[in-house]
Image (cartoon, helix red, strand yellow):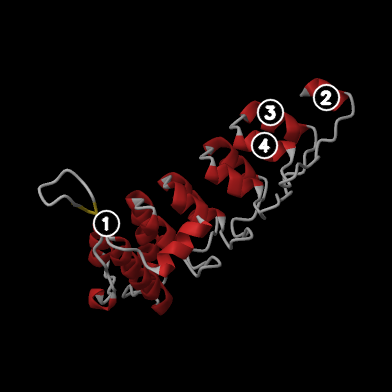
């Protein structure tokens, strides 16, 4: 790498996906290379062809050191990629609760919606990342207490919880459903259309029950994620 740079290699060159050498260093979890590139003047604000920043990539590839580094040097916690996903959405997808907490403390919006109108909490539910769900619920509770003698959640916060519970019912996420209900989320499970499907198998009835049928809404999430 040093030899290439010394020979005049373009430090911010891009491949067909808009990835720079710094992006690739993050993807390959190479702290040494990332630090070298930053020291040589690599553009840490560059976004790839999918609209992802270095912060998005650090979260996606679960890189604690680089995540802290890019937050420290000023990358926006509320940047959005072409799917409307913020770094917080991505952290809720990977399930690293420390990253979720870190991003919230740096101003990441728990109210943000992606292109499918899913919040970070929805993403955590879809991935069944219970620890991430716990962090988000705690943050909502903490926000409700700020400056209030009688803590009360905002209408938006309650709507986020209720929507997440409805999604948990749709996906059959029992642990997530239980935790959301205990946090005060409400949703009418009877409004969800569930179809039981079967497949051939070695059981006495020659069939195994599968998970409930997923709606078009869940399919849309799967396409994006």
Q: Residue at x 61, y 37 (%)?
A: 27
Instruction: Give the Cα separation between the discs numbered 4 and 1.
Output: 37 Å
Label 1 crowding class (10 Å Cα cut-off): few <14, some 14-19, many 20+?
Answer: few
Q: Quadrant of residue 169?
A: bottom left
- Residue under circle 3? 33
- Residue under circle 4? 24
Q: Earlier in the sequence, mark 2 or mark 4?
A: 2
Camera-nearest label, 1 or 2: 1
- Residue under circle 2? 4
Q: Position of residue 79 (x, y in %)?
A: 63, 59
Camera-nearest label, 4 or 1: 1
Q: Residue at x 24, y 66 (%)?
A: 181
Q: Earlier in the sequence, mark 4 or mark 1?
A: 4
Q: Residue at x 87, y 24 (%)?
A: 6
Instruction: Give the Cα separation between the discs numbered 1 and 2.
Output: 52 Å
User: Left of 10 or right of it: where is 224?
Assistant: left
Labels 4 & 1 near each other (Cβ < 8 A): no
Q: Position of residue 20 (x, y in %)?
A: 74, 41
Q: Earlier in the sequence, mark 2 or mark 3?
A: 2
Pick whichever, 49 or 184, lies toward us: 49
Instruction: Give the Cα separation between the discs numbered 3 and 4.
Output: 9 Å
- Residue under circle 1? 211
Q: Position of residue 62 (x, y in %)?
A: 51, 40
Q: Quadrant of residue 192?
A: bottom left
Can residue 119 be seen in this snapshot? Answer: no
State the mark number for residue 181. Answer: none
Camera-nearest label, 3 or 4: 4
């Amino acid at each position: 790498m040093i030899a290439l740079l010394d020979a005049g290699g373009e430090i911010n060159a891009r491949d067909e996906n808009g990835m720079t050498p710094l992006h690739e260093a993050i993807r390959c979890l190479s702290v040494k290379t990332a630090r070298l590139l930053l020291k040589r003047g690599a553009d840490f604000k560059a976004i790839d062809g999918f609209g992802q920043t270095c912060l998005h990539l650090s979260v996606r590839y679960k890189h604690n050191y680089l995540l802290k580094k890019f937050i420290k040097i000023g990358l926006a916690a509320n940047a959005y990629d072409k799917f409307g996903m913020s770094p917080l959405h991505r952290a809720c997808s990977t399930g690293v609760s420390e990253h979720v907490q870190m991003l919230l403390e740096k101003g990441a919006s728990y109210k943000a919606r992606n292109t499918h109108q899913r919040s970070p909490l929805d993403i955590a539910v879809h991935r069944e990342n219970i620890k991430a769900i716990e962090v988000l619920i705690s943050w909502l509770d903490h926000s409700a207490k700020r400056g209030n003698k009688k803590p009360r959640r905002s209408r938006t916060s309650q709507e986020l919880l209720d929507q997440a519970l409805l999604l948990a019912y749709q996906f059959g996420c029992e642990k997530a459903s239980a935790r959301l209900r205990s946090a005060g989320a409400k949703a009418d499970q009877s409004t969800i259309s569930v179809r039981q499907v079967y497949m051939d198998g070695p059981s006495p009835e020659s069939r195994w029950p599968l998970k409930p049928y997923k709606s078009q809404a869940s399919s849309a999430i799967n396409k994006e994620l």
